[in-house]
Amino acid sequence: MYIHTLSDELRRQFGGKVYKISLSGGMTCPNRDGTLGVGGCTFCTGSGEFAAHGDMAEQLKSARERVAFKAKNAQYIAYFQDHTNTYAPPERLRALFTAAMAPDDIVALSIGTRPDCLGPEVLDLLAELNEQKPVWVELGLQTVHDTTARAIRRGYDLPVFEAAVTALRQIGVTVIVHQIIGLPGETPEMIAQTADYIARCGAQGVKFHLLHVLRGTELAQEYAEGRVEVLSQEAYIALLEDCIRHQSREMVIHRMTGDGDKRILVAPLWSADKKRVLAAMQRAFERDDLEQGSLYREE
Ligand code: SF4
């Protein structure tokens, strides 16, 4: 069995355990504020449920306190996860990111954003910050299929994503791509096609998410009306295994399931018990002798 996990990669890069701490930049998203759309992606709640809030020094302090019981003298990645974290004037981004990266125990900066929010000034800033500490940018592709992208109202086309990956790689920034497994109407073949595309798009990392239905989203409405189905645990693990097999052996697997807020989880309810899900995954990976890269194909 072989999987190139994030924890292995962090140990290799930073020589020990590294924790991600979620911070809030207080930004919105053009897919929610009316610039591109108002409802956002149909599955999205804004995804800031785990982030600390307040000024940066306070956020870092309270986020560190949350993981302090796990390790003394830990190293951290400052992670801007909620909404679109390059959707603000470059000077505001500079102040925010510089403050987040400044402490010695912050070893890298990770920024979740949309590929259509990476203009030249933002790229210049990221290039400059990347000279100080490693900068990672996370892009929510979710699917390579235009029909699904339109159905979930992702709000950008594939060429926009491709241009963003090229630009980020040109400035030396690490690119991590998100895929949601189980999107409405997608067959196992379509899911594998997205995984195969991600494997060869130029990204160095991938996050796989189970499609969660969360209260208050448009997806929850579609689910209530019987228009959307969710995966069983067994089906999810089988699809995930296939997606991992399509990645190169070097691709870093950052995440193998989502981290939806249990308080608003509508379905699938089996996903709420994360420990049990991770244990089931581990058993399946060993049973199937899962080899990352076994279905990878070069260009
Ligand atoms: S781009 Fe991200 S933050 Fe914006 S609506 Fe979609 S999932 Fe939510």
Image (tube, helix red, strand yellow):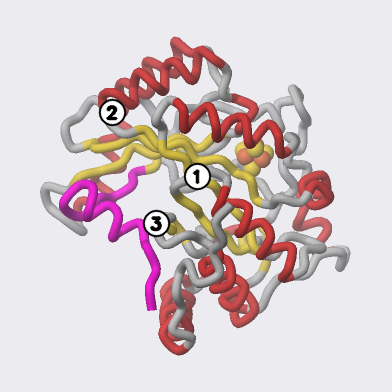
Q: Quadrant of ligand 1?
A: top right
Circles 2 and 1, Cβ within 8 Å, touching? The answer is: no
Instruction: Estimate how packed mark 3 is, as few (under 14), some (14 to 19) or many (20 or more) residues with alpha carbons within 10 Å.
Output: some
**In this view, 15 is above or below 242:** above
Describe the element under mark 1 as helix, strand or loop: loop
Front tag of 2 and 1: 1
Seen in the picture, residue 28 relative to 262 is either above or below; the reply is above
First to last magenta residue range:
1-21
Image disc number at residue 250: 3
Which residue is depicted at the point 72% across and 70% down? 188
Q: Measuring from the top left, give residue 166's x and y in whole percent.
A: 55, 32
User: Magenta stretch containing residue 172, yes or no?
Assistant: no
At which x and y percent is residue 226? 86, 68
Question: In terms of depth relative to the viewer, which is nearer, 59 or 40?
Answer: 40
The answer for how far apart the CA atoms under marks 2 and 1 are is: 23 Å
Mark 1 neighbour class, 10 Å CA radius: few under 14, some 14 to 19, many 20 or more = many
The CA span between labels 3 and 1 is 11 Å
Q: Quadrant of the N terminus?
A: bottom left
Tag on residue 203? 1
What amino acid type should be assigned to the residue bearing mark 2?
A: Met
For label 2, the residue is 101
Magenta stretch contains residue 17: yes
